[in-house]
Image (spheres, helix red, strand yellow):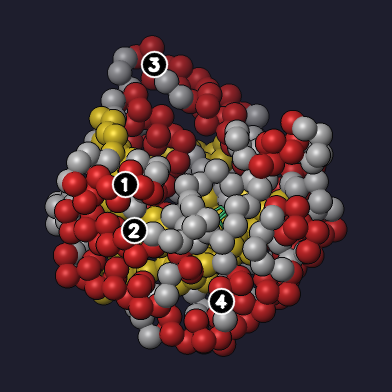
Amino acid sequence: MAGIYVHIPFCKQACHYCNFHFSTSVRYKAAMLESIAQELVNRKTYLQGQTIGSIYFGGGTPSLLSPNEVEQLLQVIQKNYTLAEDLEITLEANPDDLTTSYLQAIRQTPINRFSIGVQSFFENDLQFMNRAHNAQEAQRCIQLAQDQGFDNLTIDLIYGSPTTSHEQWSINLAIAFELNVPHLSCYALTVEPKTALDYQIKKGIAPTLSEDHAATQFEILLAQIAKNNYEQYEISNFCRGGFYAKHNTNYWTGVHYLGVGPSAHSFNGHSRQWNVANNAKYTAAITKQDSYFEIEELSPTNQHNEYIMTALRTKWGVQKSKIVHWDTQQKEAFDKKATQYQQQGYMLLQNEAYILTPKGKLIADNITADFFI
Ligand code: SF4
């Protein structure tokens, strides 16, 4: 089964750490939605008739769309694609958009999962990140969503911010557990080039980030998660009660997906393509039927590296049978590294798959890079 990603490129305000593609003006929202609908129709053969198992509205801030606008895009998908019966349809939302009336209206659409950008339950963190919501809204939106019957939800939390003490981070996790959130995505704050945070740090307005501070909070996270019966099924993703994110799991397991909207990426097994990250250029190109994306055919080396990069981060690990070696020398080098990591306690070979141990997960990026060709 394949997936569809719909990029909604609008946000109320720019979070200081964010380098995603979005505009803070919704003036051309209607034209954008028309173009996205058109792209969905134009590219209906991209996935070669595969059944769609997941649809993900990401952004940007998809909860800036009205329920009616969401419904209209879903109708275009329904008309042009074959959908699975147990289709997962996720809408990314910001806490300040999730009012009772909005949730009640969204409940009437086929949306059956929310991904909420909570980031922190503390005011100082939210202000430092320039989030549009406050601490009270961060908690309340989860309860409101659950009251409307949205049990399948995930929240994003950020650790490693200089404003987040270790105690605060533990409390953030405790609140999520207490609210019975079945899925968490937890990411370390990073400084992306050309963001406001990057500028502030360079100018000395914001403190620099500490890797040790983030590493300690990652260890707190792993300890708390285990105590509260969550499963770490990907380095940054945790669930209990079997609430895996279908759509995201597809990205990590090589499932094909179509991405529509400006900056959206697509993958069909042998190539990746990505749309122009500019709202005006995107809508103009769709209208004029011009080209609006770049495409890269994946070489065997790219495919190997991508497989290692995604699979090693998951609980399913890297399947021995899926590693392609071009010559004996390369196979020997791979096996030698794998043996070393196993002897050092960073990796296990289980059911013919290489899996990171808890110690290995702490240095996952280094291990991954070491296996790249
Ligand atoms: S709401 Fe999300 S996409 Fe928009 S600026 Fe903030 S982090 Fe970026």
Q: Position of residue 294 (x, y in %)?
A: 29, 34
- Residues packed near mark 1 inside 10 Å, few (<14), some (14 to 19) or many (20 plus): many
Q: Sequence-wise, which precedes: disc 4 or disc 3?
A: 4
Asked if disc 3 is less than 8 Å from ligand 1, the answer is: no
Q: What residue type is labelled 4?
A: Leu
Q: Which of marks 1 and 4 is in front?
A: 1
Q: Earlier in the sequence, mark 1 or mark 4?
A: 4
Question: What amino acid type should be assigned to the residue bearing mark 2?
Answer: Met
Pair 3/1: label in front: 1
Crowdedness of circle 2 by 10 Å Cα count: few (<14), some, many (20+)?
many
Residue 328 quadrant: top left
Q: Is mark 3 on a helix, strand or loop?
A: helix
Disc 2 to disc 1, C-alpha distance: 8 Å
**The image quarter in which residue 184 lies:** bottom right
Q: In this view, does 217 lie to the left or right of 360?
A: right
Mark 3 Cα within 10 Å, few/some/many (few <14, many 20+)?
Answer: few
The label on residue 282 is 1
What residue is pinned by disc 4?
A: 98
Q: Distance between the residues labelled 1 and 4?
A: 29 Å
N-term-proximal mark, 3 vs 1: 1
Q: Work out whether mark 4 precedes mark 2 in sequence or the reverse, and give the earlier one.
A: 2
Q: In which quarter of the image is ligand 1?
A: bottom right
Which is more foreground, mark 2 or mark 3?
A: 2
Residue at horizontal 51 percent and vertical 86 percent from the top: 101
Q: Is 276 placed left or right of 156 in the picture?
A: left
Residue highlighted by disc 3: 330
Label 2, secondary structure: give it: helix
The residue sitting at 55% across, 43% down in the picture is 19
| Residue where numbered disc 2 is placed | 32
Check if mark 2's residue and mark 1's residue have beta carbons within 8 Å.
yes
* Whether label 3 touches label 1, CB < 8 Å: no
